[in-house]
Image (spheres, grey):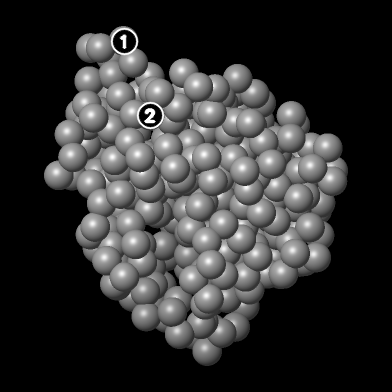
Amino acid sequence: MRYREFAGKQASVLALGTMDFGGKIPEGMAFDCLDAYVEMGGNNIDTARVYGDFVSGKQGGSEEVIGRWLERRGAREKIVLGTKGAHPPMEDMHCGRLSREEIEGDIQKSLEALRTDFVDIYWLHRDDENRPVADILETLNGLIDRGWTRVLGASNWSIERIREANDYAREHGLAGFVANQPQFSLAKQVVCHDDTLKQMDARTWEFHRETGLKCFAFSSQAKGFYTKLDQLGEAGLSPKARERFYFPENTDRLAELKKLSGETGYSVNALCILYLTSQPFEVYPILGYSRLEQLLSAKEAADGQLTREQVLRLKPEWVW
């Protein structure tokens, strides 16, 4: 496993996504997944206040499972732990929740569920563009002052708002965002029913390259799009993957992936991960799998890296 300095620790380049822990993935299976992830060298765990059982609407399920695992394994100090808060109500994704009371209330609930005094990074899960960045950053810096988080991140924020926030932080001697968490994979999601999601595009990519802002990539495997397309064809894709990703701009890339796989010995799955970790800025793919064997298959990409030329073969439109 490769590591990079992050939040005062050495963080594994492959992060573990836990959205379905405490829901579709029951606690026993989640513990097995966490144990296997650590055994393969991982120590970078991503969760959120809203993760858990999306059927019942119960929040905090993922954090509670992780908290019990951290406590039983005595693993807290070894883990780079991040959680997200201030998510809008599910029934109205455009209703902002970024008041001081809401942010502080969410992180306190998260810390209790995670059975820890602090997280290494605290993310805002969504933005509220009607609220000034000055107000938001003053609240977030209060979390750092209390020792509740070490650094700050933005998830599903526009680059304009991130730039504005970090400019304000620099001008006022405050901590700004050290990382951005957009949707980012080799496949582009063409159809999206949530207009609050932010996806890596050319402008965002260039912003990261210019500023060196770290990137945590969610949906980094695009629901296994290329792996399933390679092994099973279109019939192997889930309905969601077919609706979101099955378009020529994505499917036309499979031939180059398979060619590169033959040349390098890496599987298509590993190449999709290595495409992200070989960018000209730091990218931490968040791996979310429903089965243990899927997680273990990512181990192949833990130590590898593609050359610039190989990355450009997969997506030649983003050049550096």
Q: Which residue is mark 1?
A: 173
Q: Residues within 10 Å of mark 1 (few under 14, many from 20)?
A: few
Q: Residue 95: horizontal and vertical position, in percent?
A: 24, 57
Location of the N terminus by quadrant is: top right
Q: Is residue 193 left or right of residue 38?
A: left
Is any atom of residue 214 visible in this view? Answer: yes
| In the depicted structure, whether residue 234 falls above or below residue 49 | below
Inspect the image, locate mark 1, and give the three-letter code of the amino acid beneath it. Gly
Inspect the image, locate mark 2, and give the three-letter code of the amino acid beneath it. Leu
Most foreground residue, 298 or 315: 298
Q: Residue at x 52, y 77 (%)?
A: 55
Most foreground residue, 237 or 319: 237
Kindly identify which numbered label has been placed on residue 140.
Answer: 2
Mark 1 / mark 2, whichever is N-terminal: 2
Is any atom of residue 224 visible in this view? Answer: no
Q: Residue at x 52, y 89 (%)?
A: 235
Q: Residue at x 62, y 58 (%)?
A: 62
| In the depicted structure, whether residue 315 falls above or below residue 194 | above
